[in-house]
Image (tube, rainbow, N blue to C red):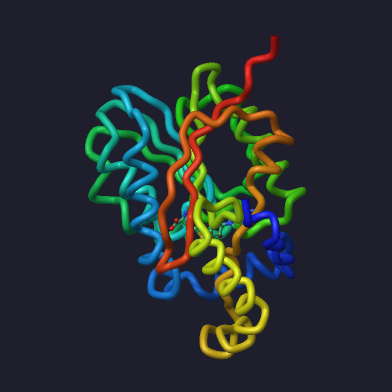
Amino acid sequence: MKSKKIREEKAPWFDGSRALKDFYSISNLYDYIMGYYEIRSNKKAIGLLNFFEGCEVLDIGVGTGLSLKEILKNLPKNSLLVGLDYCEAMLIRSKKRIDSYKKDNSVILIQSQADETKLENGSFDIIYSSFLLDLLSIEKRNSVLNEMKRLLKPDGVICICVMDIDVKNNFDNFLNDIYNFGYGRWNKIWQFFFKGYAPHCRPIRIMDNIKTENFEIINKQSSYVLVFPVSIYLVKPRKQP
Ligand SMILES: C[S@@+](CC[C@H](N)C(=O)[O-])C[C@H]1O[C@@H](n2cnc3c(N)ncnc32)[C@H](O)[C@@H]1O
């Protein structure tokens, strides 16, 4: 597959305090710059999940709550939805967005690093995360996936939605190349217009993380953010023999 040729762009400041500062300053504009373009992939990914009455769901990196709202629309009653983000300003926006969608479900929003939650082992049936892992370095992604593994119930499932280097066709490959070409170069322009913020997601080698963390892929689907390729993976930890 040609995708092997495409490099993964370095994440210049994503794991540090700079990224957090950026998300604080952009929270009120985030939907217009990124969020609304991510809805299509969020809807497709959430549509693949088998929610059941009383299930316990975690969404990591909730942003302004677009994915939370979609989950709530699909969540049967008596369920629990926990939304986590390290940026308080994003959580405040999430809270406003979902207030009218809670119905008969409990919703808890938590401010925390994705890979250092204080949540208990084996707490969730479904763990969802969209457009978070593709902000992070390979090491940080492993650490977040490891945390997800810790938090998942034995028969649980994890759904991740990312910009992905492992795409199916040559045209998507080409689009990834274009995105990468602009990634570093355009950041300065974005930063000028958007209070120092630049959209950080970029195509990543998520398959390397999936292998390192020993996940089994149950389902893989494609989607797009604007015209750029996105992959949705349903995974679960491989059972030890
Ligand atoms: C690109 S947004 C995606 C939002 C949402 N999932 C969506 O699809 O609309 C990423 C979110 O992850 C949060 N985030 C980034 N790095 C994080 C980390 N290390 N721990 C927790 N949250 C993080 C940011 O604050 C931001 O709200």
Image position of 231 with respect to 89: above or below: above
Image position of 88 with respect to 238: above or below: below
Which picture quadrant has residue 55?
Answer: top left
Image point 47% across, 52% down: which residue? 62
Image point 66% across, 51% down: which residue? 205
Q: Is residue 25 visible?
A: yes
Task: Indicate the position of residue 143 as horizontal and vertical percent values.
Answer: 72, 41
Q: Is residue 95 visible?
A: no
- Tell whether 190 sits left or right of 136: left
- Tell whether 228 sits left or right of 122: left
What quarter of the picture does the C terminus occupy? top right
Task: Indicate the position of residue 161 as horizontal and vertical percent values.
Answer: 49, 48
Image point 60% across, 83% down: which residue? 186
Q: Nearer the viewer, residue 72 or 2?
A: 2
Q: Nearer the viewer, residue 47 or 207?
A: 207
- Tell whether 236 sits left or right of 103: right
**Quadrant observed for ligand 1 in the rendered image:** bottom right
Task: Indicate the position of residue 80 as horizontal and vertical percent values.
Answer: 38, 31
Image position of 185 with respect to 154: above or below: below
Image point 69% across, 29% down: which residue? 214
Task: Indicate the position of residue 114 as horizontal and vertical percent values.
Answer: 62, 46
